[in-house]
Amino acid sequence: MDTQAAVKLLASIAQEARLEIFRLLVQAGPNGLPAGAIADTLAIPASTLSFHLKELVHAGLANQQPQGRFIYYAANYQAMNGLMAFLTENCCQGQACTPDTACCNEKEPS
């Protein structure tokens, strides 16, 4: 993954509702959820939800699949994992990063 692709993916979830939608899709698993269930769970109006889902699909973090009268949305795990790999590829100076690695135990500045 290159920097431009990572920025596109990050920008698509850099909004509260879209981040909540994406996290719900990740929790739902590969079968995803119909748009109505997403709207009900997160209390997002259908028109607003449609806009946010379109943004996630356009960025590549979500897929849509028609099933009968419904459209199911699912997280694109390959894109998510690619982004995570991009963000962490130089973690711990290229060494295996584990919870007991010094760089992972540094305290955040206050």
Image: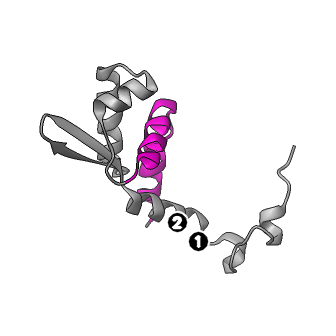
Q: Closest to the observer: 12 or 73?
A: 73
Q: What whole-number distance in Å separates the C-alpha atoms at marks 1 and 2?
A: 5 Å
**Magenta highlight on residue 22:** yes
* As drawn, 35 above or below 46: below
Q: Position of residue 93 (x, y in %)?
A: 71, 76
**Magenta highlight on residue 10:** yes
Residue occupied by mark 1: 89
Crowd around label 1: few <14 · some 14–19 · many ≥20 (10 Å): few
Crowd around label 2: few <14 · some 14–19 · many ≥20 (10 Å): some
Please indicate whether residue 105 sits to the left or right of residue 27 in the image: right
Q: Position of residue 39 (x, y in %)?
A: 36, 26
Chief secondary structure of the magenta span?
helix
Q: Closest to the observer: 88 or 37?
A: 37
Which residue is found at the position 12% from the left and 39% from the top? 68
Residue occupied by mark 2: 86
Please indicate whether residue 8 sits to the left or right of residue 51 in the image: right
Q: Which amino acid, mark 2?
A: Phe
Q: Position of residue 18 (x, y in %)?
A: 44, 35
User: Which contiguous range is marked in magenta?
Assistant: 2-29
